[in-house]
Amino acid sequence: MNGSRRATLRELARDYRWAIRQQAMSARAPRPLVNEGDPSRHPVLLIPGVWETSGFLGALEQHLRERGHRVHTLPGLGFNLRPIDESAELGAEYLKRASLEHVIIVAHSKGGLIGKRMLLSAPDRVDKLIAIATPFAGSRYADYFIAPSLRAFRPANASLRALAAEEEANSRIVSIYPRIDPHIPEGSLLEGALNVELPLVGHFRLLADPLLLAAIDEHLD
């Protein structure tokens, strides 16, 4: 096994260890669905990635609350295993039910794909998407999984390719991603979006990194 391959496996292991700890912590400390913050600021909808509950983004949610943002999570999403279009419909229904407008979606991984679909399906309610480590072009590693929830990220997946073709939404997307993402070798650069690469490594661990939090703050308003 060459050095590059060993380094990738090490980073994957570190990333999964962080994710497992975070998932366990979020299960013990459920968070409220809505935070009433400064009404002059954009409401924020947080969308986690696949196999992530809303509490998985706990560090990010706390950061946003401390800065006065009105933070919402998406009820009924569970572990985010639904198809992207179905989850986006769930999100659009929630925004309508809660009478939310000028929303900024902050989303991790698969959540960014759901957020992009919501930019298209609810453009009157969503102003911007800040996507974190999102596989806009898929991940070749998805070929090695059997679970439909993970195989949906195959670059050849028809739904993923159809969403990628919807380029008119890209101008309202800020794609923030690490220098090396061991889960997405294709990267998260999105043509037509504002792309922000951070000098970080990992797919999950960056969610609590000060560099990521600062980058999100810069593009929230």
Image (tube, helix red, strand yellow):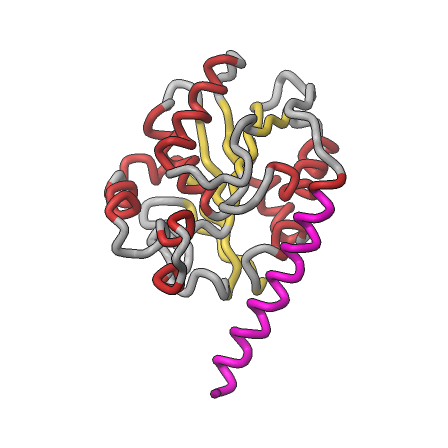
Residue at image point 30% right, 56% down: 155
Of 122 and 20, nearer the camera is 20
Residue 78's x, y, as percent? 55, 35
Q: Residue furthest front?
A: 146
Residue 105's x, y, as percent? 50, 33
Q: Quadrant of residue 14?
A: bottom right
Q: Is residue 175 left or right of residue 43?
A: left
Residue 92's x, y, as percent? 43, 22
Q: Is residue 131 left or right of residue 11?
A: left
Q: Is residue 22 magenta?
A: yes
Residue 16's x, y, as percent? 60, 61
- Say if 7 sits above or below 152 in the image: below
Residue at image point 38% right, 31% down: 86
- Say if 180 sits above or below 54 in the image: below
Q: Which residues are magenta?
A: 1-26
Q: Residue furthest bottom?
A: 2
Examine the residues drawn in magenta and state their main secondary structure.
Answer: helix
Of 104 and 164, nearer the camera is 164
Q: Quadrant of residue 142?
A: bottom left
Q: Is residue 151 left or right of residue 35?
A: left
> Total label count?
0
Which quadrant: the C terminus? top right
Residue at image point 57% right, 65% down: 201
Q: Is residue 2 magenta?
A: yes
Residue at image point 26% right, 38% down: 166
